[in-house]
Amino acid sequence: MKIRMCLFLVVLLIFTSGCATSLSNISLAKQTISTTNESDQSVLSSSVPAIDSNTDSSSSLNQSETTKASIDSSETEPYYISGQFSRAIKFETAKSLSDAAENIFAGRVISSKPAFYDGFLFTLSCIEIERVFKGNLNANEIIYVGELGGKTTYADYSKYIPIEKKIFEETTKPISPDREVREHYEGYSPMNTGDKVLLYVNLETSIDINKIMGYEKYPAISYYIVGINDGRLFQIDNTTFVKPKPSRFGERTIESFENGGSLTITLDELKD
Amino acid sequence: MKYSMNLITKRKRDTSDSASRWGLRKLIFILLVVFLIFCNNQPIKAFELFGHRFTTAPSILFYVDSTAMEYDESISYGFSFWNGHNSNVKIDRTYTKSYSRVDCYWQKLPYAHYQYAVTFHILNNSRVEPTLSDWYWCQIYFNSELYNYASLTYNQRKAEACHELGHVWGLADDNTDVRQIMCTGFGRDSSIITPQWQDIYGLGFIYPDINLG
């Protein structure tokens, strides 16, 4: 009888502790819940904040309907925006990227500038090619590569992407025109000046240059990256290129390159 | 004497039966313990969220822009799949844009060749980061390069519309299970065109269904 009781108690203990674990797992289930104050974009720092496992998601999710969000409490911090993609294809290996790309090369970003296209912010980067692995491009040639997202000022963002006012919306505090806007997709942001990159690109033929705004002397020829962020790797040493892991706000941090990031490609693989 | 011997034999048999029954029970208990340990240590991950949501109760209206009128039916049908799963969540159509909480467009996305659509969340006349802020309404841009008759079947177009509306509610992409609508297009089981239990569970987590307690 004593043994039965002991067994029963053991089972009960395990069950109750297990339930607690499960409940915490449910509440944290793959969430990207901010530990910060509701709707406060100002809490961001340039690094990716850790997710507090003690966060009670309901604190942000169960806000009352009358929540008045103030999205501009600090003008010094970047204002983050992200778009949610639904992808048709993903390139997860060097082989799949190579098969889909007409051009593969290593190069250096000379400049990166924002531009706007029919409701979208994108970045056009000027790249100096250093080494060609596939295609008709040549070393020392300069080409332009476009990517969705980027950095701009709130004044330009709101000028070229005007958002109409809905009758149910309330504007609290206006955002400063000088405030920096950073837009990212899937946890990745475009290349920056000085980046050394390995790119898998194809010629962009479907852009209507007449629709481009906020960019003077737009080049007649530009390229797009295969698989958006898939075909763009960053050089970490003389022989290795890494696609970083996505981060919450698209920032490339040391952590995002750790353990080979999402994909590592070496020069030897490219030569093959 | 014979009677005593029978009694002893019977007692032995009883003891043996009792021991085997007790052994069986022990085995069941041990199996139960192992089962519970296994179950309770597995992370339960059925959905992925942005962590924020509509500022209002999401009984909302959507508007199809003239650019997307060609695909009006697939969009409307795909959206309607979310109705009836949660008493708080409902979507209907409006023809007055200023009342709409979801504006749908169909156009070319610059330098984006592998996307069916993009969703933006909007608060106070500005797009926001949905992991940081609640939102009043959303814009969905269907990519004219892929969201068309040539590239997608009617069911696929409905599924993509349904997926994008999942983002509008506050559900993020989750590719861990291909049999859910919030799995992104490239990985999703082609037979999945409506919200599945994981999606509905996630929706209920964001907007608790009062009718279900």
Image (cartoon, rainbow, N blue to C red):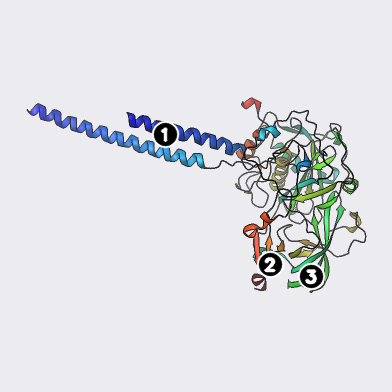
Same subunit: marks 3 and 2: yes
Which residue lies under the disc numbered 3? Answer: A129
Residue A237: numbered disc: 2
Quarter residue B88 falls in: top right
Residue A10: numbered disc: 1
Amino acid, disc 1: Val
Q: Quadrant of the N terminus of chain B?
A: top left
Query: Of label 1 and label 3, which has the lower sequence position?
Result: 1
The chain letter for the residue carrying disc 3 is: A
In what element is the residue under mark 1?
Answer: helix
Same subunit: marks 2 and 1: yes
Q: Nearer the viewer, residue A219 or A20?
A: A20
Asked whether, in this view, residue A215 is left or right of residue A204, the answer is right
Of circles 3 and 2, the one toward us is 2
Q: Position of residue A16 (x, y in %)?
A: 49, 32
Of circles 1 and 3, the one toward us is 1
Q: What's the distance in space between the residues labelled 1 and 3, CA to CA?
A: 66 Å
Q: Position of residue A263 (x, y in %)?
A: 65, 60
Q: What's the distance in space between the residues labelled 2 and 1, CA to CA?
A: 54 Å
The 10 Å Cα crowd at callout 1, few under 14, some 14 to 19, many 20 or more, is few
The 10 Å Cα crowd at callout 2, few under 14, some 14 to 19, many 20 or more, is few
Q: Position of residue B66 (x, y in %)?
A: 85, 43
The 10 Å Cα crowd at callout 3, few under 14, some 14 to 19, many 20 or more, is many
Amino acid, disc 3: Ile
Does residue A10 appear anywhere in the picture? yes
